[in-house]
Amino acid sequence: MHRLLLIIFSALLAIAGASSGCLGFERIGTATQPAPLRDGSMQSGYNHPETGKGPLRVEIEHQEDAFRIHRDGKPYYIKGIAGREFLESAAAAGANSIRTWGPRDADVLLDRAQDLNMTVMLGIWLSQHASDYADPIYKKRKIQEVQSLVESHKNHPALLVWSLGNEINLEGADTRAAWQFVDELARMIKDQDVNHPVTTVISSKQTTLNKIAAFAPNLDAVGINAYGSVTCLRTMVDHSSYNGPYLITEWGVNGHWETAQTSWGRPIEPTGTQKAEYHLLRYAQDILANSDRCIGSYVFLWGQKQERTPTWFSMFLDNLPGTDTARVSFPAVDAMHFNWTGRWPVNRAPQVLTMMINDVPADRNIILSPGEPMISRVEAGDPENDPLSYVWELLEEPSVLGTGGSHEPRPKTLSSVRRDNLPVLSLYAPLAAGAYRLFVYVLDHNGHAGTANIPFQVRESRGQTVKTGRHPLGPG
């Protein structure tokens, strides 16, 4: 089954780029040995790496046709997670780095990363509003904040790289003034800290790379967030005027803005199995295959968040509805374990192939009358033939939508029910007209779950008599 899905998805996704060999090098990041500051003094607090104290030198080298990271003099390829949760699971799966969007609890996170033999790409939040980059008060405050942050954490051995901003180009701060200020901050950081490169993170846009090349030359690399566009990312980078290394700082399944939608405008989410296939193919074809310029990646999201659904980007689920299960991992976690180690985990998540309502798939626009009987069927299996149980949850579609990944409240659960060993559920459509989504979580009782959901709409017909008193997930 896995091989068949791999073949199908291979036909849909573009293969880009190729890696190349290397001889000789040019340093573009930090120096190999502790270097003096610009005033001639040595950086304070440096200790030899073998003592376990002080920073480990990180540099980005240009080796003929390829860029490489070296950490403490050794080659280092970023196998990263975007998120702060479930770090032990990440380390066990083969991840070696953590990306943050801001410096909250940086000392705690750096210490935890050090304990797990991981590193941190430490984010520094910057405004996404162009007007702030013409505001001397904002700029002075940000300079002071960054100086303090760098002084506090520059000598931590788990620090890998500083990261200025996240997608400031997405909301309008894609201006000359903004990138010149980013460059000013990068230069300032490198004055304070000679051990770590400085990057920024952007949404995938060629004109932004051109501006970075023109106005922010002190950046050592650029992080790019790309979902469906990851398949053409290398081509975009190569066609820009930016000639340095890049890393993919968010990637995974296609975004909800990149998928097919229902006739009433709701995105159709892939199953957990389909998402795992995306992770396998894109890591091989769009990340590793471009390692001459791509110095690593951070998969999104190692954790859970509500963004159109509770499962779209999430690789884990907390507090499974209708059960006492505290946490489960999804098939994408298994895929990343394979990507990072070359081996599958001993026990893998169940695989959900299809989900239908009244034998109709999501892309055929399921429209029901209030209280109408409906039957949902799921086709699922388990790689180790573990016994499966099914948890169903009915949600209204969200009415408050975030933008650019901003906070989005989780819709209220209307009903949930558990059905052991039975991949079929009879229920009634809700009585109120509106947009809904039915979820299924297929559990293997080993801490894993396969996922799928299907959107549907309830519409009242003129003159229709609605039967009352029926529970949506009651027996049909």
Image: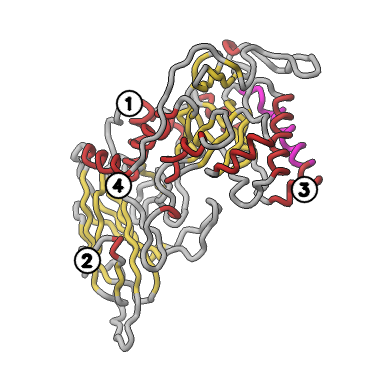
Res. 301 in view: no
Label 1's element?
loop
> Which comes sooner in the sequence, label 2 or label 4?
2
Vertical relation: 71 (above or below) 381: above
Residue at left 36%, top 64%?
Answer: 262
Q: Which circle, 4 or 1, is nearer the viewer?
A: 1
Tell me the residue that label 2 is attached to. 358
Per the model, the C-alpha gap separating discs 2 and 4 is 21 Å
Vertical relation: 50 (above or below) 90: above
CB atoms at circles 3 and 4 under 8 Å apart?
Answer: no
Front position in the image: 151 or 143: 143
Tell me the residue that label 4 is attached to. 450
Give the crowd class for mark 1: few <14, some 14-19, many >=20 residues within 10 Å. Answer: few
> Which comes sooner in the sequence, label 3 or label 4?
3
Tell me the residue that label 1 is attached to. 342
Q: What segment is highlighted magenta in the picture?
A: 140-156
